[in-house]
């Protein structure tokens, strides 16, 4: 039997408890908005084997207060199986806004999934806003995460957004979606990281759009994913760095849509840096879509922040047949930060420079067979056997011809490698033998230097790395 909520309910609802069974429909006129501080609005507990939730109304986590500052979770789904279908609004509770020297609270997460249901969102899911600080010199609350997944497949055709950081000393916006090991995401809609907090001191970091923990399931984007905007500062301080569009470790992510890093916040010393479009640390990114770094922030007449990289690759493989461009105001199209491979398939368009070129890096140009090259004015020109230019690659300044070599890629194309390359290659250029730089990547860590999270006590948090980067042109 399905229970139905058609009117406002001002207390928490737990499926399988009281008069509620394992199935619930919230109509467009219904809502759940508990008045208890930091309360989770709707729960499908792990003691319930299966649960079924359909939301066409509004579900909001409880607001934080002075005793329990963090906002509550909108929906917590811990049942091992079942489904959640959302065409309405699910939002985390707002963090407590400090009225004295107490600390402001973090916003609650919109949806936390620790079971393995099927999730379909055609509505809106947002993290709660972080609470505001009493004054500029105090920390505002961190924005809540939109969705946190530890298992199962989530399909989004609506909007998922992290909550914005609360006013105060630079607190971050929340993630759009965090995808844990064993979970996967298919995005056909929009995912946005929360905006960083405004502050009289340093602006807050923008939240990352999507973060995938190591060994998450294969995930896909055919919609739009963006990092959150960095927070602005009112005084002589730094603007917040924009959030990363997609961050992945040892995972596979396929993009046929659009991914953009967050714009850096207004600041003076310095303006905020743009977020990277994709930060890749050991996995595989396959893209036939569009990827762009975030624009550098405005310096209020004193210059601009540096744009983020389209793809920042610290290890792994980037297989590209789409378009990649650096963020406005100086961002690289691709920045290498460890032994990595970039594959340029037919149709690949690189608008901007390659930076961070070092031993162990490879650019596999699949569409040409080059037997020689020239390097002048930071441009590597690939030449065929007749001496004609068949492709060009632009690099940041500081390199020389000795930093490059060519070899066959085994697929009818050409590998550009650092220095001498493989001694057994069909064609070589003088230089030093490349080293064996480790691709390695940091494990995903709990986010925020202050450790603030918007989880309810008693739940096991799913932790993701929230590293915000100051990378620009190398």
Image (cartoon, rainbow, N blue to C red):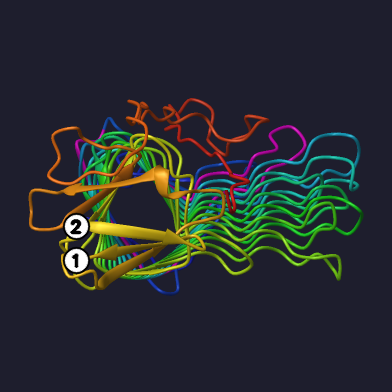
Task: Determine whether 470 is above or below 374 in the image.
Answer: above
Residue 83: image location, x then y, percent: 22, 53
Residue 171: give x, y in percent of width and height. Answer: 71, 45
User: At 41% from the left edge and 39% from the top edge, which residue is drawn?
Assistant: 314
Using a 10 Å C-alpha cutoff, classify the residue at mark 1 as few (fewer than 14 neighbours), some (14 to 19) or many (20 or more): some
Between 461 and 382, the one lying in front of the other is 382
Label 2–label 1 contact, CB within 8 A = yes
**Residue 73, magenta (yes or no):** yes
In terms of depth relative to the viewer, which is nearer, 214 or 77?
Answer: 214
**Residue placed under numbered mark 1 in the picture:** 384
Task: Say which element carries label 2.
Answer: loop
Q: Main secondary structure of the magenta part?
A: loop
The location of residue 95, given as percent across then percent down, is 68, 46
Q: Which label belongs to residue 22?
A: none
Q: Is residue 374 left or right of residue 413?
A: right
Q: Residue at x 77, y 60 (%)?
A: 232
Residue 403: percent from left, percent from top? 41, 43
* Camera-side residue of 202 and 428: 428
Residue at image mark 2: 371
Q: Magenta span has 285? A: no
> Viewed as shown, does residue 25 lie left or right of 176?
left
Q: Which range is magenta?
A: 48-77
- Whole-angstrom CA distance, mark 2 to mark 1, is 5 Å
């Amino acid at each position: 039997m399905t229970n139905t909520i058609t009117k406002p309910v001002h207390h928490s609802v737990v499926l399988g408890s009281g008069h509620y069974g394992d199935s619930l429909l919230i109509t467009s006129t219904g809502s759940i908005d508990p008045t208890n501080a930091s309360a989770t609005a709707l729960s499908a507990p792990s003691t319930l084997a299966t649960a079924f939730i359909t939301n066409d109304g509004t579900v909001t986590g409880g607001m934080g207060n002075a005793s329990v500052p963090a906002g509550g979770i909108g929906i917590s789904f811990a049942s091992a199986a079942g489904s959640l279908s959302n065409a309405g609004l699910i939002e985390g509770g707002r963090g407590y806004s400090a009225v004295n020297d107490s600390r402001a609270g973090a916003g609650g997460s919109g949806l936390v999934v620790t079971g393995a249901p099927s999730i379909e969102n055609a509505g809106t899911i947002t993290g709660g806003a972080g609470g505001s600080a009493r004054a500029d010199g105090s920390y505002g609350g961190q924005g809540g995460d939109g969705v946190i997944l530890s298992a199962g497949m989530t399909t989004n055709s609506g909007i998922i957004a992290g909550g914005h950081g609360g006013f105060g000393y630079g607190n971050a916006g929340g993630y759009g979606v965090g995808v844990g090991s064993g979970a996967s995401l298919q995005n056909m809609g929009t995912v946005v990281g929360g905006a960083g907090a405004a502050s009289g001191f340093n602006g807050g970091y923008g939240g990352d759009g999507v973060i995938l923990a190591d060994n998450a399931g294969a995930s896909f984007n055919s919609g739009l994913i963006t990092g959150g905007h960095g927070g602005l500062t009112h005084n002589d301080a730094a603007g917040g760095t924009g959030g990363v569009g997609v961050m992945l470790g040892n995972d596979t992510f396929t993009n046929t849509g659009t991914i953009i890093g967050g714009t850096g916040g207004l600041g003076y010393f310095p303006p905020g840096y743009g977020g990277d479009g994709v930060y890749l640390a050991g996995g595989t990114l396959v893209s036939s879509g569009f990827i762009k770094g975030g624009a550098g922030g405005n310096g209020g007449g004193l210059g601009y922040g540096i744009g983020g990289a389209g793809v920042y690759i610290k290890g792994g493989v980037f297989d590209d047949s789409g378009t990649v461009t650096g963020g406005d105001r100086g961002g690289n199209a691709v920045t290498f930060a460890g032994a990595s491979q970039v594959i340029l398939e037919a149709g690949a368009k690189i608008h901007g420079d390659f930076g961070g070129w070092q031993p162990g890096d490879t650019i596999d140009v699949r569409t040409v067979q080059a037997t020689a090259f020239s390097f002048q004015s930071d441009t590597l020109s690939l030449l065929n056997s007749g001496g004609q230019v068949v492709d060009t690659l632009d690099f940041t300044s500081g390199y020389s011809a000795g930093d490059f070599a060519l070899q066959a890629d085994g697929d009818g194309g050409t590998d550009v490698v650092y220095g001498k390359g493989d001694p057994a290659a069909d064609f070589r250029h003088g230089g030093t033998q490349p080293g064996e730089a480790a691709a390695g990547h940091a494990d995903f860590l709990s986010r925020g230097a202050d450790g603030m999270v918007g989880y309810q006590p008693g739940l096991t948090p799913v932790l993701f790395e929230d590293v915000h980067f100051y990378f620009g042109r190398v």
